[in-house]
Image (spheres, rainbow, N blue to C red):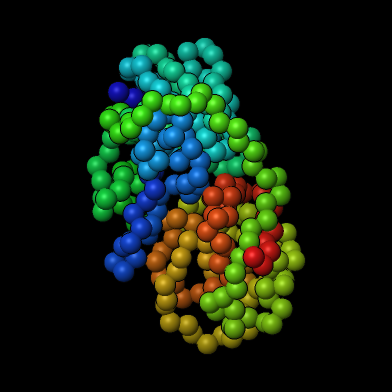
Amino acid sequence: MIEVVSPGSLTTIQDLGRPGWAHLGVPPSGAADPRSLRLANRLVGNAEGAAGLETTIRGPALRFLRPAVIALAGAPVEARAGGRALAMHAVEHLRAGDVLELGFASAGARTYLAIRGGIEAELTLGSAASDVLSGLGPPPLAEGAHLAIGAAAVAWPVTEVAPVAPLPSRPVLRVVAGPRDDRFAADALHTLCGARWEVAGASNRVGVRLRGPSLAPTDERELRSEGLVTGALEVPPSGEPILLLTDHPTTGGYPVLAVVVSGDLPVAGQLRPGDRVGFRAG
């Protein structure tokens, strides 16, 4: 019911992920900015966890083979279909044959496309989420692929548009110290929170690599692999921290200086190369 004309830079099927399988080495996956996916789904009358599309920086072109009701949320993009411009955070109606074209995100990294009924995809461990680390779930969109629209709608939209504040131009993420802050200099957390960090190009759904002052651990003894959570700030020997996102490995051997609080993870999921981000103890 949807033909992929062009896949964009990276477009994946995402829902709210598959938490609860870390003991088997399975990442939680799911939308990097779950708040935006939930909003887009609510706008079209889907359950909040219905599968939609997550685009990255540059969006796809999709031909709809039957009429559809859609909504876009998250990183703002120029969107067109059927010769007209479409709005962000609003209900839009597409006709059969319309080609939905999503351009480059003007801010943030990830835009979410919800379609009334959801995307129909095979579930793996209870989720349709695409995981770029483990390969679980459906593959990223490819030219010529076809997607089916499901029947996950639960109600008709009760509003046509949702007011949403713009993404912060200078985000500051709250963190809590540890669990391995004892392996760093006494002022390491102060250094973390006192600097503005640049998002490096080698960043993806697994983790956001940050450039700034060195936070190299002072305790060089080998650390046994231990559990990791989304939002952990892992510090390899280079001293440049990695902020783990939803496709992160479930264990790791680099010490974790601090963890971003869960309420700020949607903002972390919108970081793109070149952005500057700060931290504060929260």
Q: Quadrant of the C terminus?
A: bottom right
Q: In this image, 49 relative to 214: left or right? A: left
- Residue 265 visible, this angle: yes
Name the residue: 41% across, 64% down.
249
Q: Position of residue 203 (x, y in %)?
A: 54, 53
Q: Position of residue 261 (x, y in %)?
A: 56, 62
Q: Nearer the viewer, residue 282 or 149?
A: 282
Question: Does residue 273 lie above or below 57 as drawn?
Answer: below
Q: Disc count in the image?
A: 0
Q: Position of residue 15 (x, y in %)?
A: 38, 44
Q: Quadrant of residue 277?
A: bottom right
Q: Residue furthest front?
A: 158
Question: Does residue 140 lie above or below 178 as drawn?
Answer: above
- Residue 51 visible, this angle: no
Name the residue: 60% across, 42% down.
108
Q: Residue furthest right?
A: 194
Question: Does residue 66 lie above or below 131 as drawn?
Answer: above
Q: Quadrant of residue 7?
A: top left
Name the residue: 32% across, 17% down.
66
Q: Position of residue 89 (x, y in %)?
A: 54, 30
